[in-house]
Image (tube, grey):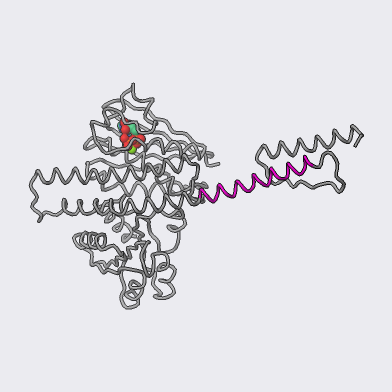
Amino acid sequence: MKKILIVEDDDDYRKLLARKLNKSGYMTFSSTNGQEALRFLKKKTVDLIVLDLIMKKMNGLEFYEKIEKETNKETPILILSNIQLSNINELVTKPQIEGYLIKANTSLAKVIDKIESVLLN
Amino acid sequence: MANPHAIKKRLAGLISVLNKVAGGDLSQNIRLAKTKDEFTPLYVGLRRVIEAMRHQIVRTELINKRKSQFFTTAAHELRTPLGNMRWSLETILDDESANLSENAKIILYQAYDSSIRMTQLVNDLLTVSKLEEGYFVEGKKLIDICDVIRKTVALFSSDAKKKSVTLKLLIPKNKHCKRLMEPFFFSEAINNILSNAIKYSKMQGTVEIAVEKTRRTIKLRISDTGIGIPKNEQPNIFTKFFRATNAKKHTKQGTGLGLYIVREYIKKWGGRIWFVSKIHKGSTFFVEIPLQ
Ligand SMILES: Nc1ncnc2c1ncn2[C@@H]1O[C@H](COP(=O)(O)OP(=O)(O)O)[C@@H](O)[C@H]1O
Ligand SMILES: [Mg+2]
């Protein structure tokens, strides 16, 4: 069973996504900010990270800056946020970052499609 | 300064600088002569005008940047509750154990559709105001157009499946279609055309995306076997908020802003978009973008 870490501070979004992922046959873990996620990844390994951007304590981009150095992990990351940064294009060409979806613009079914295709590669 | 020849020469110099400034070149540095004469106030004045214009440009850039940041934040704030609604409704509608009555399902679907429509409206209105206010904020990058198309098309597989629509992608293999452009805007443009093709498809239809690269241009053809566009309404479909009568009957989903946005983007890239369509038979949209 593939393992997915959801890094998301909004309880509703996190629970809805976890539920959908579980139903689709994935095992999920949750962190509510970048710091928690880093701590988690120092101990455990997952197949994919779903990453929100705007979070207190440590936001998604800060987390991304640190993941390589602090955990030595090259886990693929799917950014899932409601903010549409103007440098999306730069972000998605960076190592590990496999995509950038806007939550409100994307159905849960489409999120699953995307995750499946990332995990296939 | 009695020498008419000298006066003529200096006037010519001034006029040339003025013309450059009028043409938007503010890099002119006005040097003042060591000795004052009748021309000095003119030079001083011109120098002040150029400085004021430079200042204005810096200010405008700052204001645009602030506005753009405001839009980004406002959009985020609007999307957060809308997305929550969308995912919540999708979840309950997907949940077989919820045992919803048919009537409850219909009503929840209405709410679900409305949440999507509202989100689309928020997105489209933001894009339109950005386009019209003239701050095309995303940076340009050398991208592989074919690659962006492949990724965008892949995102539609579940939508197509839902309507049993066959999605065909004909794209040259191993060909690079590199161009300097805004990748997110480009995928948004493709997204708008493709979402129309699927949305206005009938069940079991076919949507075909063909990409052709010539030496100087990239050509896209997106065709569907859907509802088509009535002949008398065809001239209007790129107009803001316009939706054809048969489209409105077919689905409530739509803002009428999608094609307007697409055309504005394509214009900025120096390309063009056109279409042929036959009611009840289908539509084909053509896009041509120079690879510069
Ligand atoms: N593939 C298509 N098939 C039929 N009609 C289309 C198609 N694409 C666009 N149209 C027509 O053009 C109108 C404008 O398109 P668009 O700006 O994308 O608005 P909408 O939000 O309604 O999809 C649509 O409402 C529809 O009438
Ligand atoms: Mg549309």
Q: Can residue B223 be seen in this view?
A: no
Left or right of B61 on screen, residue B237: left
Which residue is pictured at 7% across the width and 47% down the height?
B101
Identify the main secondary structure in magenta. helix
Q: Is residue A91 magenta?
A: no
In this view of the protein, which residue sits in the foreground, A21 or B51?
Answer: B51
Q: Which of the 4 image quadrants contains residue B166?
A: top left
Does B274 sit above or below residue A120? above
Quarter of the figure that contains the C terminus of chain B: top right
**Residue found 78% across the figure and 38% down from its top:** B14
Q: The magenta stretch spans which residues? A: B41-64
Compared across the picture, whether B272 is left or right of B84 comes to: right
**Residue B227 in sight from this viewpoint:** yes
> Residue A3, percent across and down?
27, 68
- Picture coordinates of residue B245 (x, y %)? 27, 27
Quadrant in which the N terminus of chain B is drawn:
top right
Residue at the far top in the pictured view: B232
| Image coordinates for residue A92, horizontal then vertical, percent | 42, 57
Relative image position of residue B171 (x, y in whole percent) = 40, 44
Q: Depth check: B226 or A55 in front?
A: A55
Q: Is residue B235 above or below residue A27?
A: above
Q: Which image quadrant shows ligand 1?
A: top left
Left or right, residue A1 beside residue A41: left
The reply to whether the magenta stretch includes residue B56 is: yes
Location of residue B38 (image quadrant): top right
